[in-house]
Image (cartoon, rainbow, N blue to C red):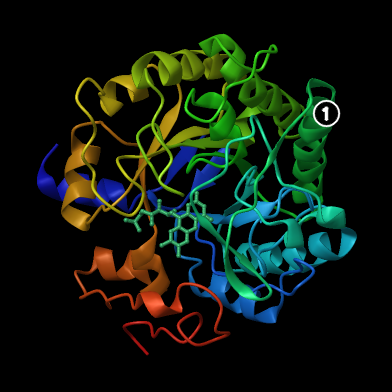
Amino acid sequence: MTDNSTRTDLFSPTKLGEIELSNRIVMAPLTRGRTNEDGVPNELNVTYYAQRVSAGLIISEATNISAQGCGYAMTPGIWTEDQVAGWKKVTDAIHVAGGKIVMQLWHVGRFSHVDLQPNKEAPVAPSVIKADGNVFTSRGIEKASMPRALRTDEIPDVIEQYRHAAECAKCAGFDGVEIHAANNYLLEQFLRDSTNHRTDQYGGSIENRARLILEVVDAVTHIWGGGRVGIRLSPVTTEVGNTPLDRNVMATYGYLIQQLNKFKLAYLHFVEGTTGKSRDVPEGVDLDKLRSLFDGSYIGNNNYNLEMAISRRAEGKVDAVAFGRPFISNPDLVERLRYGIELADINNDAYYGNGAKGYTDWLKANN
Ligand SMILES: Cc1cc2nc3c(=O)[nH]c(=O)nc-3n(C[C@H](O)[C@H](O)[C@H](O)COP(=O)(O)O)c2cc1C
């Protein structure tokens, strides 16, 4: 392919599983901490997503599947009727304007605080290992609380939380869901040997550590069908909370990805490198090789620019590219990339909280 046709290809329609995209530029999931206290999306959230509708696919900010899954105040949920109704306004606005949106399903595991948990209980995790990270409570930034290990007989309830949330996402009108198994939240805490020291059937061998993710995928695909379910993994990130990597990244993630093939998922989504930081990977890790084990479509993310997106696409390394921070400050990112318009720089003071400021007040180039 010539440069020009590859460039055109990035802005042409495609399909990830059963989800049809008008272009291959995806908006990465971005927590913005601007939802109501009860996790119900509001009018400001509707405006924010609608401003970014020209993305081929919007992946929603990580959305708590249950009260137990919540680790950050002012983040949205998807387990109550009011939350479903709030999200329905978002999906309606996207669909009226011709866009597509999937919901990222989130359980934070040990990245939480007793103040955010039902009855002020300890957050749940695979093992009693404290997270080295901060969470947000209504009082501000706090250290994550000491977690307790989930009992084996509680795991069916965690899977049920995912199933119920997937069902709620369907009622809320989403085009599909993305299972958040990245950035060291609950599912990746189970997968990595650094955070999972269990001795039951959910710990120890790679097969056991991958079991929870596969059981969650099974439950969620029963609601949606594989073609509308994606999964996000981050094999080499230490984010969040400076979490150590698995001792055998290639074997662990390689096993998981091969097992995922039987669900015929819409896509696999990788954070390539350390989330929001370097794209480097440790010696012995080859992310392209891991990706090639997956039979379906692939979304690449982390520190991409237009040139990288074009060249990785031309090499056949990605089917679509997810941009995170550039979508915060450039609601019309697709048009800017397409017509070579300069990008507005992100101001990271505005990442979380702060209402409309730094959220819905970024201008489009043609304003
Ligand atoms: C403010 C902010 C919020 C984020 N929230 C999420 C999230 O909810 N879920 C997730 O999987 N990743 C989240 N990420 C990571 C991004 O999706 C993405 O992986 C990262 O920003 C790297 O992509 P980029 O270089 O295009 O920004 C967040 C990143 C930022 C900067």
Mark 1 CB near ligand 1 (8 Å cut): no
**Could you tell whether 210 is left or right of 317 in the image?**
right
Q: Which residue is pictured at 65% across the width and 42% down the height?
A: 109
Q: Pointer 1: what residue?
A: 154
What's the residue type where badge 1 is placed? Glu
The x, y position of residue 43, in whole percent, is: 69, 80
Vertical placement of 144 versus 166: above or below? below
Instruction: List x then y, in percent, for residue 64.
Output: 70, 53
As drawn, 26 above or below 215: below
Q: Which quarter of the rendering shows the C terminus?
A: bottom left
Image x and y of residue 325, in percent: 37, 64
Question: Is the residue 237 above or below the residue 263 in the image?
Answer: below
- Residue 98: horizontal and vertical position, in percent? 56, 62
* 203 left or right, relative to 148: left
Total label count?
1
The answer, for residue 211, to whether it is visible in the render is yes
Pick the front one: 138 or 70? 138
For the point 23% across and 48% down, the residue is: 278
Badge 1 element: helix
Q: Name the image quarter holding the N terminus.
A: top left
